[in-house]
Image: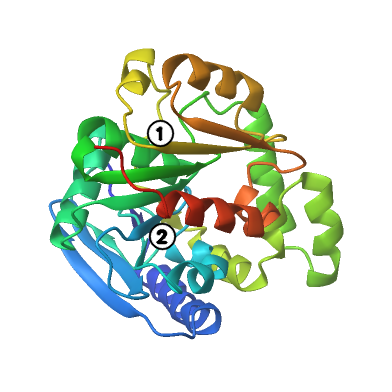
């Protein structure tokens, strides 16, 4: 199985220079940088905010890293400990040394990371692929999850032509001259391309080979095992899945879960509606876990 890596040292060094510059530009506040050894490689995490027993742990979507959450850190860390993670196998500051073959491996990586960080319980927040990993962790290691906030998570449909068209269109639009991007963002329904600093960094990932498995669709049996308090935020215009069908399935299989379909938002929900997503994360983090 493949490992996440750049094709050569030159590409790697260019990316890391862009990464460090983006980190300095987008996260100028206080933070603690942690490099945590796991069986799957060294994982970079950033910790901010006051000490707390149940931190908010942020997991990015495919092709992203902790910096995708830069707009959220200040608001979330005012009253909560926040840990933003560069997932092993994605382009970031983590270094993968062993393959992650399936969701169980992904859950094992996250469980090991949380254990090493001495996190007894976490409010897990995952966007897209990060949502799939958070759900895998809850299924295989349920005891460490205080709550789940899943932002248009993967794992409810096989990505089809609509999603790949959306992703490719967004990637191309992100290389366009800056004055054109607002128009293109509306055209391709992808507000992520308005994140200028992130787009500059992401252009350096073109030579990166992801070392992670596809987000397999969850079975009914797997979803019935989800016991943690859960909020599913779904973009009404998501290119990844039919949000109404996902909501109906969740109502049948996880009746205690809350599901919110956000009008006008797409798969880029964190950049489409950052204030709403921040509010919902804080509300979930403020809940007490049911014994």
Can residue 224 be seen? yes
What residue is disc 1 on?
214
Q: Quadrant of the C terminus?
A: top left
Residue ID at (38%, 14%):
220
Q: Provide residue 138's location: percent of width, then percent of height.
A: 29, 36
Q: Which mark is residue 91?
A: 2
Snapshot quadrant of residue 145? top left
Is disc 1 placed on a helix, strand or loop?
loop
Label 2 neighbour load within 10 Å: few <14, some 14-19, many 20+: many
- Residue in front for this viewpoint, 57 or 90: 57
Where residue 93 appears, as percent x and y from the top left, is 34, 68
Whether residue 121 is situated above or below residue 165 in the rendered picture: below
Give the position of the N terminus as an image quadrant. Answer: top left
In terms of image quadrants, where is residue 50?
bottom left
The correct choice, above or below, for 182 with respect to 23 in the image is above
Q: Is residue 76 left or right of residue 8?
A: right
Q: Residue at x 35, y 42 (%)?
A: 134
Q: Tell me which corner region of the image, top left, top right, bottom left or bottom right, holds residue 263.
A: top right
């Amino acid at each position: 199985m493949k490992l996440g890596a750049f094709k050569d040292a030159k590409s790697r060094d260019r990316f890391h220079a862009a990464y460090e510059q983006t980190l300095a530009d987008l996260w100028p506040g206080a933070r603690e940088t942690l490099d945590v050894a796991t069986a799957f490689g060294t994982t970079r995490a950033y910790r901010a905010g006051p000490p707390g027993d149940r931190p908010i742990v942020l997991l990015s979507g495919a092709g992203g890293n902790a910096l995708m959450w830069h707009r959220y850190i200040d608001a979330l860390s005012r009253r909560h400990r926040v840990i933003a993670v560069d997932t092993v196998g994605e382009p970031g500051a983590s270094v993968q040394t062993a393959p992650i073959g399936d969701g169980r491996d992904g859950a094992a990586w996250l469980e090991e990371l949380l254990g090493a960080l001495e996190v007894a319980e976490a409010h897990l927040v995952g966007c897209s692929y990060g949502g799939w990993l958070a759900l895998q962790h809850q299924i295989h290691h349920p005891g460490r999850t205080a709550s789940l906030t899943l932002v248009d998570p993967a794992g409810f449909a096989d990505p089809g032509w609509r999603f790949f068209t959306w992703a490719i269109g967004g990637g191309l639009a992100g290389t366009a001259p800056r004055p054109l991007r607002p128009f293109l963002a509306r055209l391709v329904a992808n507000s992520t391309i308005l994140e200028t600093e992130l787009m500059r960094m992401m252009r350096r990932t073109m030579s990166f080979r992801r070392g992670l498995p596809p987000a397999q669709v969850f079975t009914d049996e797997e979803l019935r095992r989800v016991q943690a308090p859960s909020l599913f935020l779904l973009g009404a215009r998501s290119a990844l899945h039919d949000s109404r069908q996902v909501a109906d399935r969740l109502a049948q299989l996880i009746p205690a879960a809350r599901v919110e379909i956000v009008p006008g938002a797409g798969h880029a929900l964190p950049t489409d509606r950052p204030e709403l997503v921040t509010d919902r994360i804080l509300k979930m983090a403020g809940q007490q876990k049911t014994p």
